[in-house]
Image (cartoon, grey):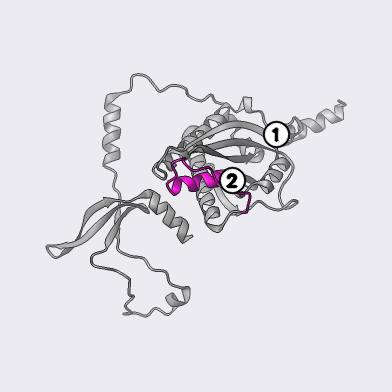
């Protein structure tokens, strides 16, 4: 290399030097694999209770590939979505899944026990199937953000950009991505999903990701600390809301509201009331009265599987 060439190379940014060397080194970011594994574990936990049988979701490989190859792979996927990395609006992360992944989710949601042959139709996804896939993508992004926060201590926010990646030529095609390929197994069938994170989003985190993942829990846990932690957590104030009914109206209806107007809701005095905390439905309750005040009595737990299906159908 000439002297001028050496000066030019030295003057390049970190990103350009990495690109010229063939992409980021996973050996120098050992914590990244732990982040993906933690993501997979949380996704699997979030699926617990949605299906009758066990659904296993795990990372198979973590590799470095060219961004252009991921763009082609997204075009071939049954369902794909693009996410903007909040720390770098030019950096686009992508998630893609094959048909078997979506079909396996549906098998679990609708009570499959594996006795029937797996559905293998080669066709476009329906609106309901697409909705289920997108809800699964949301769980993946939420779990990935939580894994970065807990293991790396950074806010790796992913914001949905569009339902499908930008067409060829519309996005940055140069550079590299770190791709985590995962597999969902259940009911005698399986499906694949991948998460591709652009090098541009990972470069600022290389120092934090260079740490080795902790393999063991600290020995000799302090019982006093554990007791105080439990007391603090259980004494945390939370707000409960009893939601009797909701109704959908148009913006035009809202614009016509007047002072003193009565808005009718399809409420039945014998209907169940949803007890919610932080937007999450916890229990179904019966409404009553005592000493001139309204009361609610817990009747049953909320069926999370049915709630998930209802969200899909409403979407």
The answer to which image quadrant residue 108 occupies is top left
The answer to which image quadrant residue 246 occupies is bottom left
One can see residue 208 in this view: no
Q: Residue at x 25, y 56 (%)?
A: 285
- Left or right of 255? Residue 266 is left
Q: Which residues are magenta?
A: 97-124
Crowd class of label 2 (few under 14; some 14 to 19; many from 20; radius 10 Å): few
Q: CA distance from mark 2 to mark 1?
A: 46 Å
- Left or right of 307? Residue 159 is right
Percent across and percent down for residue 17 are 74, 32
Mark 2 or 1: in front is 2
Percent across and percent down for residue 311 are 44, 56
Percent across and percent down for residue 43 are 47, 40
**Residue receiving disc 1:** 14
The answer to whether residue 246 is above or below residue 2 is below
Q: Residue at x 57, y 52 (%)?
A: 160
Residue 118 in magenta?
yes
Which element carries disc 1, helix, strand or loop?
A: helix
Task: State the quadrant of the N terminus.
Answer: top right
**Residue receiving disc 2:** 120
Crowd class of label 1 (few under 14; some 14 to 19; many from 20; radius 10 Å): few
Percent across and percent down for residue 268 are 27, 68
Which element carries disc 2, helix, strand or loop?
A: loop
Q: Residue at x 71, y 45 (%)?
A: 72
């Amino acid at each position: 290399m000439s002297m001028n060439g050496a000066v030019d190379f030295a003057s390049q940014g970190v990103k350009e030097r990495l690109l010229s060397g063939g992409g980021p080194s996973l050996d120098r970011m050992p914590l990244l694999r732990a982040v993906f594994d933690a993501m997979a574990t949380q996704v699997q936990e979030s699926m617990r209770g949605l299906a009758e049988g066990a659904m296993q979701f795990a990372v198979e490989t973590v590799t470095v590939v060219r961004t252009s190859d991921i763009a082609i792979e997204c075009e071939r996927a049954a369902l794909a979505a693009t996410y903007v990395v909040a720390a770098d609006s030019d950096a686009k992360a992508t998630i893609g899944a094959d048909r078997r992944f979506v079909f396996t989710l549906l098998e679990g949601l609708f009570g499959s026990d594996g006795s029937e042959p797996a559905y293998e139709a080669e066709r476009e996804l329906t609106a309901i199937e697409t909705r289920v896939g997108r809800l699964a993508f949301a769980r993946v992004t939420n779990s990935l953000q939580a894994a970065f926060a807990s293991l790396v201590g950074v806010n790796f926010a992913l914001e949905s950009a569009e339902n499908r990646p930008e067409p060829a030529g519309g996005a940055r095609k140069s550079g590299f991505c770190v791709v985590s390929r995962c597999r969902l197994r259940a009911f005698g069938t399986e499906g694949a999903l991948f998460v591709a994170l652009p090098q541009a989003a990972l470069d600022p985190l290389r120092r934090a990701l260079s740490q080795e993942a902790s393999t063991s829990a600290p020995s000799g846990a302090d019982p006093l600390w554990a007791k105080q932690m439990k007391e603090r957590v259980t004494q945390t104030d939370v707000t409960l809301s009893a939601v009797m009914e909701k109704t959908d109206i148009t913006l035009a209806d809202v614009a016509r509201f007047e002072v003193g107007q009565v808005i009718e809701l399809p409420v039945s005095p014998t209907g169940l009331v949803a007890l919610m905390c932080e937007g999450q439905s916890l229990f179904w309750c019966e409404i009553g009265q005592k000493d001139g005040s309204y009361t609610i009595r817990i009747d049953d737990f909320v069926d999370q599987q049915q709630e998930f299906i209802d969200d899909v159908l409403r979407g």
